[in-house]
Amino acid sequence: MRISEGVEWALHCLSVLAALPAGATLPGKALAEFHGVSESYLLKHLKALVGAGLLESVPGPRGGYRLARAAAAITFLDVAQAIEGPEPAFRCTEIRRRAPFGAPPGCFRAACTINVTMLQAEAAWREVLRKRTIADLATSIATLPAAWLRDATAWFTPHVRLPGA
Amino acid sequence: MRISEGVEWALHCLSVLAALPAGATLPGKALAEFHGVSESYLLKHLKALVGAGLLESVPGPRGGYRLARAAAAITFLDVAQAIEGPEPAFRCTEIRRRAPFGAPPGCFRAACTINVTMLQAEAAWREVLRKRTIADLATSIATLPAAWLRDATAWFTPHVRLPGA
DNA sequence: GGAGTGATACTCGGATATCTGGTGTCCGAGTTTTCGCGG
DNA sequence: CCGCGAAAACTCGGACACCAGATATCCGAGTATCACTCC
């Protein structure tokens, strides 16, 4: 079991976008350079976020990405499912039905206990992620040293495209 | 994110072994045939369970596998970690440190909130699996139709090796 | 000086390679059984 | 009839291919900007 690092990238990018003025866009190139990752590959993940309705993309010069809705309305679960897909991690293949002798009809009408348990565990996992939003990340970023926040703001400013300008 | 189907196979095999008389062994060939899966590949997973201390293997004719401890003392979590490995599914790569401008020393002393949250979600996942044991599977199997249980017992009997015999 | 127009530069989007890890298979090491032989 | 021993059969264990999905990259479509020309 392994979670794609695209989830980590997406969460960091969303936290950056949440710190921008309302409506402002930031190109993927800036996001990639800031995080020290491949721009081309990051775009692949950002595209998934656009498809999931978490981001909006603006084409052309002065374009980029911006949040599609309020940061408080974007949960970690939304991001994880946008990147990893909605399917559960555990998929029951019903091997109990493959016994070499026949089974009476309706024998396995009840759901497989193994499957039920694994899905319960995943539900607990999702429940934790559903309670955390991108807005929570913004508050935690505010606790970083003021010097770093100033440097970060200075670095981002030339790349930010304000809506009215 | 995807859980190896080896976890499903292992859980089903353990539930079968838990239904045998105490100390009896069952060869991997019978387990594979019963579940309709590749014997060679199943052995790979059973070997992992032996390495994790959940199963004991007996070599030679009249050999096979048996539980290393009581079914009630083997949790779903033990099985999942034996197959998937102990590492967390989410691995923080600390991309926040890669900003193109320097960071003051000790700037990121606090743990990354993203990492903390993802690990909390995994902890919730593990907590559910820690509460379920192989013994729980045995009780759920008892609810299957009596006809099927009789057929299953009849099919397994020639393959079971009792400890004293 | 202002409007129109073309070229330009920059953006995202999709199609295409590469690579790691799970999946599947094979052959070898070890042990118990079994059969044959001798006493 | 009983004990001994070698061969055989069956088991697990580890090493070797194969394949799907994640990773990484490149090129093309689209749009706002900018410069230039003309009125």
Image (cartoon, coloured by chain):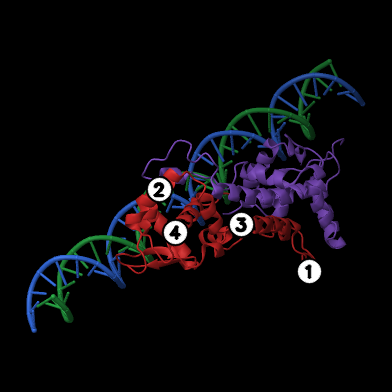
Chain colours: A red, B purple, C green, D blue
Q: Where is residue B113 in the image (x, y as percent from the top left)?
A: 55, 48
Above-or-below relation of B60 to A89: above
Q: Position of residue A92 (x, y in %)?
A: 67, 59
For disc 2, the chain is A
Please report whichever mark, 4 or 2, sits nearer to the chain's N-terminal start: 4
Helix, strand or loop at label 4? It is: helix
Are dots 3 and 4 in contact, CB under 8 Å?
Answer: no
For the residues marked 3 and 1, what is the alpha-carbon distance in whole angstroms?
A: 37 Å
Label 3 chain ID: A
Q: Which residue appears at 38% of the width and 40% of the height?
A: B102
Foreground mark, 1 or 2, reads 2
Going by the numbered disc 1, the residue's amino acid type is Gly
Which amino acid type is shown beneath numbered disc 2?
Arg
Callout 3 crowding tier (Cα within 10 Å): few <14, some 14–19, many ≥20: many
Which mark is first along the chain, 1 or 4?
A: 4
Nearest to N terminus: mark 1 or mark 2: 1
The disc label shown at residue A150, or none: 2
The answer for which chain carries disc 4 is A
Evaluate whether residue A108 shows in this view: yes
SS type, badge 3: helix
Q: Provide the residue designation for mark 4.
A: A17
